[in-house]
Image (tube, helix red, strand yellow):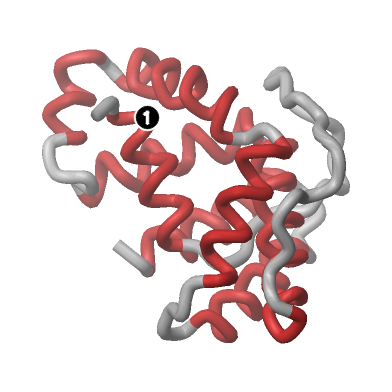
Amino acid sequence: MSIARQFSIALALSITAACGASEPKSSSTAQEVPAPQMKPSAEKYEGYDTCVAAFRRQRDCTDTYIPALVDARVRADKPAGIAAKDKEMGRDGLVAAALEEWKSDSTDQAIDRTCTNITNDEQDGAPELVERAKHCLAESECAAFSACAVDIVSSRW
């Protein structure tokens, strides 16, 4: 499994909510898709909306979010071995690999699938994560948002 795929999986499993877009899109190209095909139960719908907003904001802030996530993962060596991979590939190479994987993991269809799975799963601490994600979404700058979102992700490693 690629390091970038591990980033995506760890992100999807560790964050119940993420970004919503208020800043211009980065250089990433995300394909737009129709409304979600699967809807979570009504009582989890707020968490789903927050999750979608968070992932979209991560996508909009790709140029700051992915490097910040890679940096945090290398410092923590999560997943195990990523610090060695960083030394082997170099930070630019590792970020480039993560960005390539992010292209497919940040499409609206992938976000819908991820957020549906996350909000339909009974995770401990989900309400707290939703509140933390709302706090991140309130950040107007990508740098502040990205730091906040990475803090949420890293708290779940």
Q: Is residue 111 visible?
A: yes
Residue drawn 55% across the image and 53% down it: 147
- Indicate the quadrant containing the C terminus: top left, top right, bottom left or bottom right: bottom left
Total tally of numbered discs in the picture: 1
Give the side of residue 117 with respect to residue 39, left or right. Answer: left
Q: Which of the 4 image quadrants contains residue 8?
A: top left
Where residue 104 appears, as percent x and y from the top left, is 57, 26
Residue drawn 59% across the image and 23% down it: 103
- Tag 1: residue type? Ala
Where residue 15 appears, as percent x and y from the top left, is 50, 63
Where residue 83 appears, as percent x and y from the top left, is 17, 35
Dot 1 surroundings within 10 Å: few (below 14), some, or many (20 or more)?
Answer: many
Q: Which of the 4 image quadrants contains residue 44?
A: bottom right
Where residue 146 appears, as percent x and y from the top left, is 60, 49
Give the side of residue 101 with respect to residue 87, left or right. Answer: right
Q: Is residue 135 visible?
A: no
Image height of 18 relative to 7, above or below: below
- Out of 59 and 64, give the one closest to the viewer: 59
- Indicate the quadrant containing the N terminus: top left, top right, bottom left or bottom right: top left
Give the side of residue 68 with respect to residue 1, left or right. Answer: right
Residue drawn 76% across the image and 81% down it: 42
Q: Which residue is mark 1?
A: 4
Residue drawn 74% across the image and 37% down it: 60
SS assignment at label 1: helix
- Out of 60 and 113, give the one closest to the viewer: 113
Image height of 124 relative to 112, above or below: below
